[in-house]
Amino acid sequence: MRAAGVSGGSDNGVVYIVVELMSAGDADPSAPCVRAVPCQVDPVSGQVHADAPVVLSAADCVAWVTDREIDRPRWVWADTSVVYDFLLARGVWVAKCHDLRLSRAILSRAAWVDSSVFRAPSSQAEQGAQELAWWDGPTPVAARQDVLFDESHSEVTPDCVAELERQMRVLRTAGNGWRQRLSFLMALESAGALIAREMYAVGVPWDRDHHEALLREQLGERPAVGVRPAALEAVAQELRRLLDAPELNPDSPKDLLRALNSAGIPVTTTSKWALREHRHPALAPLERYKHLARLWTAHGWAWLDEWVSDGRYRPVYTPGGVVTGRWGADGGGALQLPRAIRGAARAGDGFTFVIADASQLEPRVLAAMSGDAAMAEAGRGGDMYQRIADAGVVPSREHAKYGMLGAMYGGTTGVSAQVLPQFRQAFPTAMAMVESAARVGERGGQVTTWLGRTSPPGVVSHPDESDDADVARERRLRSRSYGRFTRNFIVQGSAAEWAMAWMVEIRLRLHQLSLGDPTLSAPSLVFFLHDEVLIHTPVEWAETVAEVVRVSARQAGETLFPGSVVEFPVKVLVNDSYTDPKVVSQGVGESHGDLADHAP
């Protein structure tokens, strides 16, 4: 990894304000109140100097927090999904926070720090606090709310000031530039938590009638509980006939596998990849059945009943929910929203959507983080794959795409394997980076993303002299598999960091445009999918919002990779329904002009 610095991670002079929700006590045990503790963090030791706590009623905290937000403190709390929901419900917006749960997850696994302080609690109370579920990973919001307000847990309510100091002390053990990177990563992750809760509060405008019409078109009328939709049952009957299995339940993998084998299709799994190796008249309807069954079970009428209310779809995101740092989903299926139903996202009268998609994000991130001059030059243009082909590295754009995928994912067959020698010759620095990461993984080691998120420890799987041939082969396969994981971890994880920096830039710039207007008449981020964002905006703001998206992409690249020539263009589409910009957008948006810098 290059030694270039990463801007935006310093907190020198920033005031931290620790916020905890409490019960109002005997006056009204069910009513929450807020305990706020302004703090200063010593930039050398990490020691936290806390002022006297302030206890505020729910009503008083609105004016108090809003007044202090003028100075842009970093709000500190145990879990954004609890405390920020409390503030959002009262119309309070904050610019930045430090989520202790998410930050501990990053620091406790980071390779470049001494995290032993987390494993050495100084008191029984701290031991109890560290065992609370919110330290360990995402748990349902309701469960975390119960923990914070349940009097039976009062003796182990987390001391957020003490935890902040623990984290600052751990952060100070990072060296060689990693302290700044990790600090910025925690700031991004915490900002992502703010965005996730804001998107949940606003929701995606959703036309239930349109969604139901789509379901009727593909599945038929809504069936009774426990009964397949008519169109799905018709395909099931066709499968029974073609496989000569009148009692077949196509929803049972065991039944389906038995019927396929009996029909002369020798497979051990019903995955589409295995089935594509065979020819049989039942395979096409089987694929159709699976498609319809997924639509019915994952995004059918039951999904509508649970996740769409008051004309809004509200998925529950979990920032950092995937090991690479990508977001996960705790409900609502946001990360698997099929194109078939996206048309039900309707902006409404006077509004529209700005849909933006980062172009070829992972290859550009690899070019920028590796510092490979030739690959970076290819990343200057709109179509990176075409520029690689035009440079004569490979014969065609398709070869360039497969070569890049092979580089990032460890492809060893087909076109990927054929063009990897050309890639090694043309892009030696980038290829050396991913291949070094693969070798580290094969040895059971750990690798890091650009900002320092660390991969899980691997298992050393090298064969030894006592292994028989089968055991040795299995060990080699496990070793190579983990090597492919670490090869991709550094790229996918770093791309997730760029995407989050992009989102944070968009959020802050939209807030500036709206002048802090908390109503739905202001542009709002409403949906995020890895490298794609959806913004709901009044029609008259659409072009301004599109420019915000482009400028934010450029700023995210400059912030994470200062001095790199790699560009991060985005495709932008303005439409009154949610349509995939990869399909319908023409060209790549260029940036014109600039806005004030609002990097967190």
Image (spheres, grey):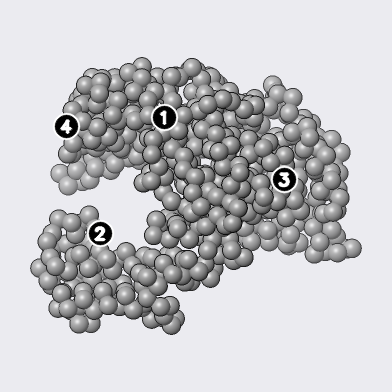
Q: Are marks 3 and 1 in contact (CB under 8 Å)?
A: no
Q: Position of residue 86 (x, y in %)?
A: 73, 54
- Determine crowd level at label 3: few under 14, some 14-19, many 20+ residues with C-alpha closer than 10 A: some
- Amino acid type, residue under disc 1 in the picture: Val
Residue 209 visible in image: yes
Disc 4 to disc 2, C-alpha distance: 27 Å
Task: Give left or right: position of 179 versus 219.
Answer: right
The answer to which of marks 3 and 4 sits earlier in the sequence is 4
Q: In the rendered structure, find residue 147 and report the number of the disc placed on it.
A: none
The residue mark sitting in front, 3 or 1, is 3
**Can you identify the residue that label 3 sits on?**
517
**Can you identify the residue that label 1 sits on?**
365
Q: Are marks 2 and 1 in contact (CB under 8 Å)?
A: no
**Can you identify the residue that label 2 sits on?**
271
The residue mark sitting in front, 2 or 1, is 1
> Viewer-proximal residue, 176 or 361?
361
Disc 4 to disc 1, C-alpha distance: 23 Å
**Can you identify the residue that label 4 sits on?**
418
The residue at the point 81 percent across, 48 percent down is 62
The answer to which of marks 2 and 3 sits earlier in the sequence is 2
- Determine crowd level at label 2: few under 14, some 14-19, many 20+ residues with C-alpha closer than 10 A: few
Q: Position of residue 483 (x, y in %)?
A: 31, 36
